Amino acid sequence: MEERFKMYTNMGLPRHPQNTTAGSEAECESICQKNCSCTAYAYTNYCSIWVGELFDLKQLGKDDINGSTIYVRLTPSEFPNIQDNSHHLSGKLKVIIPSIAVAAAALIACAIFCICFKRMRTALKTTEHAVEAMDQVIDEDTDENGGIGVQFFTLQSILEATNNFSNANKLGKGGFGPVYKVINQLFRISLAS
């Protein structure tokens, strides 16, 4: 950031000015600004600049009418009313960008949690319905002795009924393997009951 000038009014001007030709106060400021050794300028009817230290610069009293206005060059760090907006903006961005990132991450995490929670509740409800349905089927199939009413057969009785799983008794294939017809009359009766 470039250096600026601070105005001081009703001042007794310092010793050893360098008088230059300038048609306006703006020209006088430009002359001082172009000279990196210029520390101050004043413009009355002519332009005065000071190079180096300002000797005998003093504030005059309120009643003194001989005071002049002088502009003293200050660096940005010395000029309290002017801030470098680029540093101020980058400081704000250093706070805003992480805040937005944290908020976005929290929002995404909440959305993922909600989706997972909803899926879990749906799966749990489906499982509960399946268990209730199975309980109902078991309750309907349960006999008076507490069994579930399913016929059990020994391997020997199945071998006799299918003639040792003979190909002559094979009807086809099902989802769990080959299907055989039963040849034993007793086996059919026990199946039907």
Image (spheres, rainbow, N blue to C red):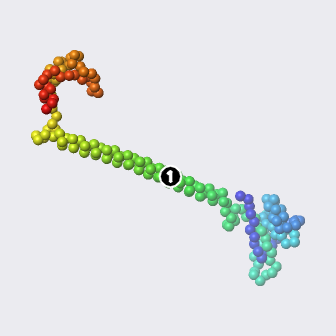
The answer to which of 108 and 78 lies nearer the viewer is 108
Q: Is residue 93 visible?
A: yes
Q: Give left or right: position of 30 versus 84.
A: right
Whole-percent x, y for residue 186 in the image: 11, 25
Numbered disc total: 1
Residue at (75%, 72%) from the top-left corner? 8
Whole-percent x, y for residue 73 in the image: 75, 65
Disc 1 marks which residue? 104
Kind of element beneath mark 1: helix
Residue at (83%, 62%) from the top-left corner? 31
The answer to which of 183 and 82 lies nearer the viewer is 183
Q: Quadrant of residue 129?
A: top left
Residue at (50%, 52%) from the top-left corner? 104
User: What residue occupies the far right of the structure in this picture?
Assistant: 21
The answer to which of 162 and 14 lies nearer the viewer is 162
Residue at (25%, 43%) from the top-left corner? 133
Q: Is residue 12 visible?
A: no
The kind of residue tagged 1 is Ala
Relative to 84, residue 190 above or below: above
How many neighbours does mark 1 have within 10 angstroms: few (below 14), some (14-19), or many (20 or more)? Answer: few
Quadrant of image for the N terminus: bottom right
Q: Give left or right: position of 132 versus 161.
A: right
User: What residue occupies the far bottom of the structure in this picture?
Assistant: 63
Whole-percent x, y for residue 94 in the image: 58, 55
Whole-percent x, y for residue 127 in the image: 30, 44
Q: Quadrant of residue 7?
A: bottom right
Q: Give left or right: position of 39 versus 182.
A: right
Relative to 185, residue 92 above or below: below
Quadrant of image for the C terminus: top left
The answer to which of 151 and 61 lies nearer the viewer is 151
